[in-house]
Image (cartoon, rainbow, N blue to C red):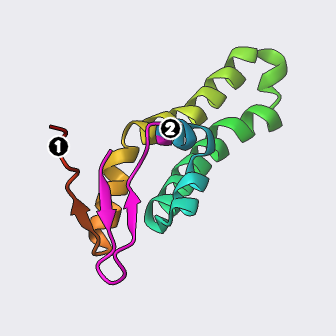
């Protein structure tokens, strides 16, 4: 777990924890918004919104749910796939975001 220090007030924050992957998978763009990473919150919202707009909505409106339940399952799984992809990269995304904001990496002491 990597920690970062704010350059002006010496506040220390961890980029991500072991459960960050789960939070990112479950809450998607909202996780990045709460974490303060507006760039990826907006990007993830646009990607997942596009997936839902083009796959899930026509499934409901076009009546494909009644004809083929597999179509809805595919559409929903593609929506969750965006969360899964983002969850795989959440640690590096958070670290790069903090470095971009000017935070410095704090080296943890080695146990002796």
- The x and y percentages for residue 45 are 57, 55
Q: Give the range drawn in magenta.
A: 1-20
Q: Name the residue: 23% across, 51% down.
A: 108
Please tell me whether residue 97 is drawn above or below residue 25 in the rendered image.
below
Q: State the residue in front, 107 or 17.
A: 107
Q: Which mark is residue 28?
A: none
What residue would you read off at disc 2?
19
Local packing at callout 2 (Cα closer than 10 Å; few below 14, some 14-19, many 20+) is few
Labels 1 & 2 near each other (Cβ < 8 A): no
**Which of the 4 image quarters holds residue 76?**
top right
Please tell me whether residue 47 is drawn above or below residue 112 in the rendered image.
below
For the view shown, which residue lies furthest in the front direction? 112
Please tell me whether residue 7 is drawn above or below residue 17 in the rendered image.
below
**Which of the 4 image quarters holds residue 11?**
bottom left
Left or right, residue 7 beside residue 110: right
* Quarter containing the N terminus: top left
Q: Name the residue: 47% across, 38% down.
A: 21
What residue would you read off at disc 1?
110
Q: Name the residue: 27% across, 75% down.
A: 102
């Amino acid at each position: 777990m990597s920690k970062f220090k704010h350059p002006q007030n010496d506040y220390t924050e961890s980029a991500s924890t072991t459960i960050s992957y789960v939070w990112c998978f479950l809450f998607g763009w909202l996780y990045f918004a709460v974490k303060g990473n507006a760039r990826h919150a907006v990007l993830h919202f646009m990607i997942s919104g596009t997936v839902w707009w083009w796959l899930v909505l026509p499934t409901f409106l076009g009546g494909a749910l009644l004809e083929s339940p597999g179509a809805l399952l595919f559409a929903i799984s593609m929506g969750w796939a965006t969360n899964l992809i983002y969850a795989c990269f959440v640690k590096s995304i958070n670290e790069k975001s903090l470095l971009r904001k000017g935070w410095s990496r704090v080296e943890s002491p080695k146990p002796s």
